[in-house]
């Protein structure tokens, strides 16, 4: 029944309209308008010249695109002690380290749980599932106390170590590795490969969709995360992009009006990388999510 | 049947037997344990222990300077009977979660089901997923322009233009509108994960199932949905139910971006906003932990209930 899904088709050179499917396409396009228009507006605004930003009546699309907002963005923070590039560096640095570590730690752990009958594996996985069922903010206070007592407040460590063990990442990885045929592992061992070699040369290449998916998800969550830097650091030089953006967009009404262009540009810079990464990895993500179900 | 190593193990006594057993264990599980160790240590340190410490702290008075003072259930009594602002936060969270949760859950499943049958489904999937990977702070630039409370706001302008209103609607200032703005943005941002999970699950149903269904007398697409598809995507439905519960109970960033913190008359105050307020503004860690434990129990219980609901039946 999955076949006749076009709004129209051409049979024997004649044009046939399928009214039911046409209606479905119209409804879906309306929903797409709801999801996509704010993003299109974001892109369009980032390139609007000053007079178009405050044009009345307002215009949705940019008429004469300009890069001036991006230049303003760099200038708007040049008077402050922390240059805009520092926020970009912080965000990129923390995101890259966190993504790498969480992928590494989750895939190694998930492989051990999935393919070796380690005693206690069942309990550990049950804890991972249980950890999926409550918001991360529940553990924030003791985590803050731990980080604070280790003397790591205001360091990059504080922005990294609480984000390495992510139950969601471990769960997806384990579900995907479960599908990996045991016979291949057996034959690798027969050939004398040790565990380390088996993991890196056989398992990791085969589960590429899973770690590509973790790459997308953990990039997104780290890149967008502002609360960690807000809680664990109070030095301006340690803040990340979303917080810098809040500083630019907020503040006194007059300055925020003058910075409307700059903050639209910053919002664009915040949003574009996550969407680009998702689009590049979309097919891998779809493969992985097929195994995301929980069998209760 | 006993293996050779087991016979050898039993022939040894005392410490030698222990040494032999552990060397066997190491041979078998040593490398995998090392593989698991980093994740396990991190999870114990930043998830398992914190939950237990929160439980303990919630029964104390603790400000991070003086040692924790045992209070019994006083924090919980205060929270549930005397803290009017928490009760407002609880009510708001239930309103937000109660509307956005079921709405996004049903919408994402139906959208995934329809899109799975459409042409250009990758483009549709991108359009549905993209909002969920945006940043609440970044998007607030857009929302503030769309929902601006003066007549320069895009939505107010359109409503004026078509004569629907004569006075600008105070989208981000009047409590009755703030709630709806938050709900709209929340729905916009939270359709992603559930949608992706469901779409992936649907794609993985083997086509042979539909052929078999057609032979068994499945007549239309709704019968197909009910008898063939839903039973096959139960695990995905459960996963996305849990994600929806957790996400909708942790609503925080969007209300703060729309209405500030504290919001007018606390109209957009939520459980997490209350938690953040007591933990990281007032540093009343004991009381804040009671809020965290309450949230934990709420989310955990609802997720357990959904696991029961989606349990396979015969």
Image: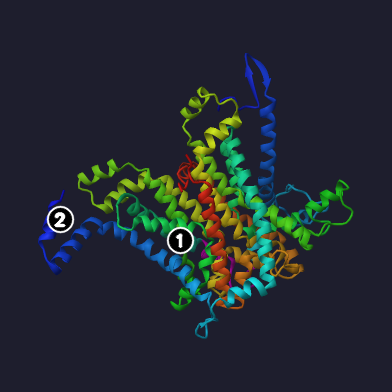
The residue depicted at 23 percent of the width and 52 percent of the height is: A194
- Residue A98 is tagged as 1
Residue A90: within the magenta? yes
B314 vs B56, nearest the viewer: B314
Instruction: Measure the C-alpha gap from mark 2 to mark 1.
Output: 44 Å
The residue depicted at 56 percent of the width and 47 percent of the height is: B194
Name the residue beneath numbered marker 2.
B6
At mark 1, the secondary structure is helix
Occupied quadrant, residue A121: bottom left
Residue A213 in view of the camera: yes
Query: What subunit carries mark 1?
Result: A
Horizontal side of A150 relative to A225 (left or right) equals left
Mark toward the viewer: 2 or 1: 2
Image height of B69 relative to B89, above or below: below
Instruction: Tell me the crowding category of disc 1: few under 14, some 14 to 19, or many 20 or more residues within 10 angstroms, Cα based.
Output: many
Residue B5: within the magenta? no
Image height of B282 relative to B171, above or below: below
Occupied quadrant, residue A267: bottom right
The residue depicted at 77 percent of the width and 62 percent of the height is: B175
A257 vs A63, nearest the viewer: A257
Query: What subunit carries mark 2?
Result: B
Residue A86 in view of the camera: no
Count of numbered circles in the view? 2
The residue depicted at 61 percent of the width and 35 percent of the height is: B114
Residue B214 in the image: x percent, y percent?
A: 53, 24
Q: Residue furthest bottom?
A: B66
A129 vs B178, nearest the viewer: A129
Q: Are marks 2 and 1 in contact (CB under 8 Å)?
A: no
Give the extent of the magenta segment.
A77-91
Residue A223 in the image: x percent, y percent?
A: 54, 59
């Amino acid at each position: 029944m999955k076949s006749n899904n076009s709004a129209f088709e051409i049979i024997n050179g004649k044009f046939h309209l399928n009214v039911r499917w046409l209606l479905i396409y119209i409804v879906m396009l309306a929903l797409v308008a709801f999801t996509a228009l704010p993003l299109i507006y974001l892109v369009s605004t980032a390139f609007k010249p000053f007079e178009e930003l405050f044009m009345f009546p307002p215009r949705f699309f940019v008429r004469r695109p300009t890069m001036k907002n991006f230049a303003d963005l760099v200038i708007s923070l040049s008077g402050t002690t922390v240059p805009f590039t520092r926020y970009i560096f912080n965000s990129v640095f923390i995101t890259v380290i966190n993504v790498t570590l969480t992928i590494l730690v989750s895939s190694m752990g998930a492989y051990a749980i999935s393919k070796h009958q380690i005693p206690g594996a069942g309990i550990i996985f049950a804890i991972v599932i249980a950890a999926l069922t409550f918001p991360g903010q529940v553990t924030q206070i003791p985590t803050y106390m731990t980080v604070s007592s280790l003397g790591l407040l205001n360091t990059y460590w504080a922005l990294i170590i609480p984000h390495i063990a992510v139950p969601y990442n471990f769960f997806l990885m384990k579900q995907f590795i479960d599908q990996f045929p045991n016979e291949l592992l057996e034959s690798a061992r027969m050939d004398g490969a040790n565990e380390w070699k088996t993991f890196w040369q056989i398992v990791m290449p085969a589960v590429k969709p899973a770690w590509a998916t973790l790459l997308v998800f953990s990039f997104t969550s780290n890149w967008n995360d502002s609360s960690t830097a807000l809680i664990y650091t109070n030095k301006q030089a340690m803040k990340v992009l979303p917080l810098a953006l809040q500083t630019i967009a907020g503040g006194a009404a007059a300055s925020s009006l003058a910075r409307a262009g700059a903050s639209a540009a910053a919002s664009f810079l915040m949003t574009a990388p996550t969407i680009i990464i998702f689009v590049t990895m979309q097919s891998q993500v779809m493969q992985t999510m097929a195994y995301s179900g929980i069998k209760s | 049947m006993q293996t050779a190593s087991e016979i050898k193990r039993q022939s040894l006594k005392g410490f030698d037997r222990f040494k032999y057993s552990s060397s066997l264990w190491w041979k078998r599980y040593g490398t995998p344990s090392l593989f698991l160790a980093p994740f396990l240590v991190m999870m114990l340190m930043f998830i398992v222990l914190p939950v237990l410490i929160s439980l303990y702290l919630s029964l104390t008075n603790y400000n991070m300077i003086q040692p924790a003072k045992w209070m019994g259930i006083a924090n919980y009594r205060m929270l549930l009977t005397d803290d009017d602002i928490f009760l407002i936060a609880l009510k708001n969270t239930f309103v937000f979660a109660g509307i956005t949760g079921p709405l996004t859950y049903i919408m994402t499943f139906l959208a995934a089901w329809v899109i799975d049958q459409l042409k250009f489904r990758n483009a549709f999937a991108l359009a549905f997923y993209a909002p969920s990977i945006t940043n609440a702070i970044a998007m607030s630039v857009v929302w503030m322009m769309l929902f601006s409370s003066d007549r320069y706001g895009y939505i107010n302008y359109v409503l004026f233009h078509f004569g629907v209103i004569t006075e600008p609607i105070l989208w981000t200032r009047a409590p009755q509108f703030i709630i709806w703005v938050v709900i709209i943005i929340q729905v916009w941002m939270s359709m992603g994960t559930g949608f992706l999970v469901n779409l992936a699950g649907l794609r993985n149903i083997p086509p042979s199932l539909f052929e078999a269904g057609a032979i068994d007398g499945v007549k239309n697409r709704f019968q197909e949905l009910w008898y063939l598809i839903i039973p096959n995507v139960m695990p995905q439905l459960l996963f996305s139910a849990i994600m929806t519960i957790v996400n909708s109970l942790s609503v925080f960033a969007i209300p703060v971006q729309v209405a500030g913190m504290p919001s007018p008359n606390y109209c957009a105050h939520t459980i997490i906003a209350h938690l953040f307020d007591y933990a990281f503004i007032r540093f009343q860690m004991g009381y804040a932990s009671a809020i965290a434990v309450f949230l934990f129990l709420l989310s955990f219980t609802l997720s357990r209930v959904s696991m029961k609901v989606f349990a396979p039946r015969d």
